[in-house]
Image (tube, helix red, strand yellow):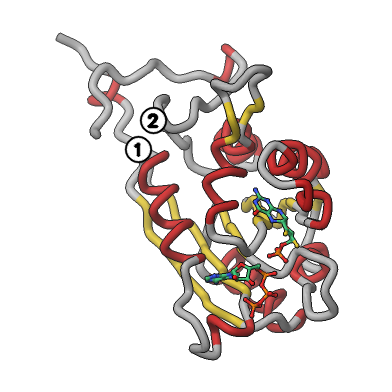
Amino acid sequence: MSDASQDNPIEPVRIGLVSVSDRASAGVYVDKGLPALQEWLARALLNPITWVTRLIPDEEAGISAALRELVDDEACSLVLTTGGTGPALRDVTPEATLAVAHKVMPGFGEQMRQISLRFVPTAILSRQVAVVRSQALILNLPGQPKSIAETLEGLPNATPPCPGIFAAVPYCIDLIGGPYLETRDEVIKAFRPKSAQRPARRNPAT
Ligand SMILES: Nc1ncnc2c1ncn2[C@@H]1O[C@H](COP(=O)(O)OP(=O)(O)OP(=O)(O)O)[C@@H](O)[C@H]1O
Ligand SMILES: Nc1nc2c(c(=O)[nH]1)N[C@H]1C(S)=C(S)[C@@H](COP(=O)(O)O)O[C@H]1N2
């Protein structure tokens, strides 16, 4: 019996993760950002993932340098940051991200704040942005570790539903020439126009 998975092996993806935290990077507390990002992405994606991780303080130049390195040298197709998106003096992740942008993708920030407002009224304090640099999508997430799953997954079963931003990530990465990302529908259902869809897999690995 033919199976799409035999003709189309799942493409590997390189993902960069950057936890921006003065205290976690100094060892004052244990970093929960990188584990939370890895846990959610490993659950959501069927693709084999190579992780490239960084735990760094809230310094604009250092954050921009890490983002350039992950995209330009490490060939990551997707980079997620956590932390440093608020209004505090040392919160500079959005500025550092915009400094390496080739294109700004405002829809992600708009949707992320809409989702987060369903969880906390202080969602509007996050200045998170998303940008494209070369063939990579870079997304800022807030520092609170629980906000990672909240933002990526949304509240698809709530009334009214609130789609998670990750639903739009695979098609965005298609459009910028990255690997074909495949998700587990029970975690997040990727949306692609019909013309961009490959045949569904019958037995996605669990
Ligand atoms: N990497 C992390 N690991 C664990 N908890 C974190 C991390 N980053 C943030 N938090 C938690 O989420 C809260 C809000 O995050 P925020 O990015 O505003 O941190 P912050 O107050 O600027 O401090 P820092 O940069 O030292 O983590 C923090 O006060 C902390 O309780
Ligand atoms: N989903 C979600 N979004 C959230 C939060 C949260 O707990 N969950 N915290 C908010 C708060 S309190 C702040 S100050 C901003 C900025 O957080 P950051 O500086 O840690 O990035 O994110 C906001 N967005």
Q: Is residue 122 above or below residue 59?
A: above
Measuring from the top left, give residue 112's x and y in whole percent: 71, 43
Residue at image point 40% right, 40% down: 45
Q: Is residue 14 above or below residue 100?
A: above
Measuring from the top left, give residue 128's x and y in whole percent: 76, 55
Q: Quadrant of residue 100?
A: bottom right
Residue at image point 71% right, 47% down: 120
Q: Residue 54 shows which numbered tag?
A: none
Task: Please state, as top left, top right, bottom left or bottom right, where the C terminus lies in the image.
Answer: top left
Q: In this image, 158 relative to 86: left or right?
A: left
Measuring from the top left, give residue 41's x and y in whole percent: 44, 48
Measuring from the top left, give residue 144's x and y in whole percent: 60, 61
Tally of marks? 2
Amino acid on which disc 1 is placed = Leu
Q: In this image, 82 relative to 104: left or right?
A: left
Q: In this image, 158 relative to 140: left or right?
A: left
Give whichever of 147, 47 is nearer the camera: 147
The answer to the question of whether label 1 and label 2 lie on touching residues, with beta carbons closer than 8 A, is: yes
Residue at image point 64% right, 37% down: 165
Picture quadrant of ligand 1: bottom right
Q: In this image, 157 relative to 105: left or right?
A: left
List the residue tagged with mark 1: 46
Give whichever of 131, 166 is nearer the camera: 166
Task: Please state, as top left, top right, bottom left or bottom right, where the N terminus lies in the image.
Answer: top left
Q: CA distance from mark 1 to mark 2?
A: 7 Å
Give whichever of 123, 81 is nearer the camera: 123
Q: Quadrant of residue 185?
A: top left
Q: Residue 184 shows which numbered tag?
A: 2
Residue at image point 71% right, 69% down: 84
Amino acid on which disc 2 is placed = Arg
Q: Which element carries disc 1, helix, strand or loop? A: loop
Q: Which element carries disc 2, helix, strand or loop? A: loop
